[in-house]
Amino acid sequence: MNFQPLGADLLTTLVFLPALGALVLAFLPASSKVAAKAIALATSFLTFGVSVLLYRGFDPATSVPEAFAIDRPWIPQFGIRYQLGMDGLSLALVLLTTLLTVSVLLVSCGQEIEKLKGYLIAFLLLETGMVGSLVALDTILFYVFWEVMLVPMYFIIGVWGGKRRIYAAMKFFLFTLVGSLLMFVAILYAANVHLHATGIQSFSLADWTRAASSGAWHLAPGTEALLFGAFALAFLVKVPLWPFHTWLPDAHVEAPTGGSIILAGVLLKLGTYGLLRFAYPLFPHAAARYGPLLAGLALIGIVYGAWVAAAQKDMKKLVAYSSVSHLALVVLGIVAGTGAALSGAIFQMIGHGLTTSLLFLLVGVLYARRHTREMADYGGIAARVPVTTTLFVLATLGSIGLPGLNGFIGEFLILGGVFQVSVVWAAIAATGMVLGAIYLLTLVQKVFWGPETSPANRALTDINGWELAGAFPLVALIVLLGVFPRPLLTLVEGSVKTLQRAGAPVAAESLSPAVAPDVRRLGLHEVAAPRTEAAR
Amino acid sequence: MTGFLHVGGADLACVAPELVLAGFATLILLLDAFARPVRAFFPYVTLFGLGVANLAGRDASGLFFGGAVESSGLTRFIELVACGAVALAVLGGAASLERDRRDQGEFYALLLFAAAGTIVMVRGVDLLVVFLGLELMSLSLYVLAAWYRDVPAATEAALKYFLMGALASAFLLYGIATLYGRLGTTRLTALQGLSSGSSFVPFDVLLSAGLLAIVAALSFKIALVPFHGWAPDVYQGMTTPAVTFLSTAPKAAALIVLLRLLHALFPAGLPEPWRPLFAILAALSILFGNVVALSQRDLKRMLAYSGIAQMGYAAIAVATFTQDAFEGVLVFLAGYLVTNAAAFLTVAALSGGETDPRTLGDFAGLGRRHPVAASVLTLSMLSLAGIPPTVGFIGKFLVFRAAVDSGLVGLALIGVLGSLVSVGYYLRVVYVVWMKEPVRDVTLVPEDLLSGAAFLLTAALMLAWGLFPRALLDLARGAAVTLGGR
């Protein structure tokens, strides 16, 4: 199917539609709240619709984002191009982003929010930044979108956040900026290297990757290590990998519900996305050399995040630290680099985006009614809020990797893939999973089950229609991807093939003999097997 | 030999913009003396004059007045910068001047004279003409600094600026004289011939002393560390519309003159002692300006230190000294003009009056009182911090890129580090304006059409140049050709 011309225009629409909505909102008088909500919702639904259209027209055999691209000169004097494109990896994350934005806006319609117009504008601008980062294929263009994300998020935390919001917003901004500014210098340096190596002035990822894989870069190992370090730092701060994670709990605790959802659901994934899209393909030798270092940090992060989460009394902080742990597992999968580990990592990026967002959404539902996130203030509220409880339990089970829900597939694939590389890594990572079950189930038990402890909770009302509307798609996808993961795996299969570094192909059959029987017994070989006929 | 005093029509046509500016300045002075009731129209007369001056500018390039002045892409660039800076100052400042009954014609006339001086500075191919332009500009600004003469801070600012400015002028003249003593000419074009013709030693004591004096004088105008001492006090005391001009166009002109002189002396690239010197000046300005700005509570002082740091970024281009760097710095300066003007104008719009304290806390919660001005202020802070998609990012991108390309990665890293520090105070302004509860009741200048136009214009330019920098780059490229002589 020749989808190219339509696809090209759709990509630009996808990126700038939310910004257009924000612009319209800006001219609306602040008093017309209903109209503001309607415009914001309509924009987010339309954007989601566009991303679904892109999904329908997407050829799963696409293995490089350039195959599906729009490419125009932007600043021709310096060879900077307006180059957008997507492969399965980008598309999966774009779908997640546009869906979560819809969710956030739906939920915000159901809750009292001051300065509503600004709130909606910030989320729409944020969406443009996120989607833009996911589809930009020119490094400068990517950097622009990457930085554009910072400002709305700074406002979301700083204006609509909790007591220590200013501190949290500033910390978020500065931490992220340290990494990205170093990446900026690295981009400039890499462009210079590319110019000298090939004689072509280009900031295009495709050109650079070609130079990197053909060896035309001629990078000295030390230089490559520094460049890789600058790129990796920018992304690892965003992930955030231990020890760069300290901004995350602060940001999450202070951010409003919507901010937390987007932060956990999408922004963190952009870190791992950046590793996959930029840091690894551009500097493969340095990546291979420093892989064990990253793996070590990831392993510390898995255990440390889980351990610290178990000690939290604040629900949001607990979920935030669980994200530190879960995302570290994703990084471990990326470092392992086998087909299975990468499929799992990408699957887990989506899965974590869904479950953690749902958890934050539901904590936000409780917070909007009781204005506290302390676990001790709740207890035994299951009977008061049966629907919230059900959904929370579901999200928890999804998050700890119960078979039949999405978390299981991702974690299993990652662990299986990591196992091929190092048994020790896999063993340590698995302990993190066990700890995860402990602290998340403890959370559920303390908050929802047992005798009702506080009389203040008697007036607690259950999740309302708007909030439920926002939560529903997440719930549906958590279950759907758990029992029927294949569409997602097929979608990212092409990307995994391009990205995988260890020899093993994606198919579970070729997992090492030690893992393969287990995979077969669980029926996962169908899940992980490439859909060869359908794809061609 | 065509003498200096033999003036033809083509010579006059070359300096037409300056003549128009001076003409309108004189017209305003006369109107103010003999037709006082028309005072309310002075802003419009000034704007009209600026428009005419710009139309009078020519694209044709060449040397005139016996080779003492030139018309080129570069002079075209500075015409736009100088006229743009005056236009923004007038648009944003007219309302507050009228409110304070300080809207005498001299204000507008002096601004126009200062703009003419700025243009002459860059137009001069002869260092004496450069000096003339610099003096015309400086003398106008000394008076403007004391515009609110009953405000003690303003008279202090004027006195400080005048005394130190006079010293800088003396240095410049001394440097020019020394160069003349060594090389026998004050013509930049003649210098080029001299230096390419063998007997020229790259490090020559007399030449170096003269050049050092000129560099010090120009660095004073640019406010580079360690020649920055005047900036915070002058910025703080001077009336804000005038600072809008002072902090942009003169700095741009001085930097361009510096680049031209250096290029005339060293067409093959900066030799050893000079390149590290400018690298050090740049690094010191970036680090000192940004770190000290962090601790400022007065917004105009903070912007003064921020300006020192910003000029440090521009000085990176001097140390880099490639064609790309020249282009980059021109884009940077154009972006800095609109961004800084936006910052000062919105600060003026958000304060109660000339003597109103401008500590950061006083701006608490004003975002909701005057959302347009506060939004533009936010945008300008982001642009100063170099956050895309604003023009501030494009400028820094080009300057850093040129630096990295010519091997000055360390300097680029210092620049980036400075940007990081700067985010601390730029974002604090954003936070105070939007995220703090108002602490006091203040009567703001009523929103008027002219300042609204200035806000929209600067905001549009910050975003448009940030998103679609092609046109600006082409302009800068055209101008840089003259600068680099290629």
Image: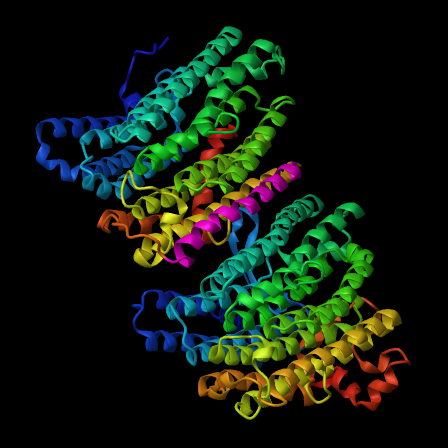
Residue at horizontal 60 percent and vertical 75 percent from the top: A315
Q: How many marks?
A: 0
Compare residues A248 and A405 and report the one nearer the observer: A248
Lateral position of residue A415 relative to residue B194, left or right: right
Looking at the image, residue B116 lies above or below residue A358:
above
State how the image is colored: rainbow
Residue at horizontal 80 percent and vertical 72 percent from the top: A429
Q: Is residue A433 within the magenta segment?
A: no
Q: Is residue B436 within the magenta segment?
A: yes
Residue A16 at least partly seen: no
Residue B296 at least partly seen: yes
Name the image quarter holding residue A132: bottom right
Name the image quarter holding residue B153: top left
Q: Quadrant of the N terminus of chain A?
A: bottom right
Q: Quadrant of the C terminus of chain A?
A: bottom right
Looking at the image, residue B265 lies above or below residue B46:
above
Instruction: State the predominant SS element of the stretch in magenta.
Output: helix
Lateral position of residue B327 relative to residue A217, left or right: left
Compare residues B51 and A186 and report the one nearer the observer: A186
- Residue B28 in percent (x, y) is at 17, 30
Residue at horizontal 66 percent and vertical 49 percent from the top: A186
Lateral position of residue B102 relative to residue B486, left or right: left
Compare residues A354 and A96 and report the one nearer the observer: A354
Name the image quarter holding residue A501: bottom right
Compare residues B278 and A464 and report the one nearer the observer: A464
Q: Which residues are magenta?
A: B408-437
- Residue A386 in percent (x, y) is at 55, 92
- Residue A483 in percent (x, y) is at 69, 90
- Residue B265 in percent (x, y) is at 54, 19
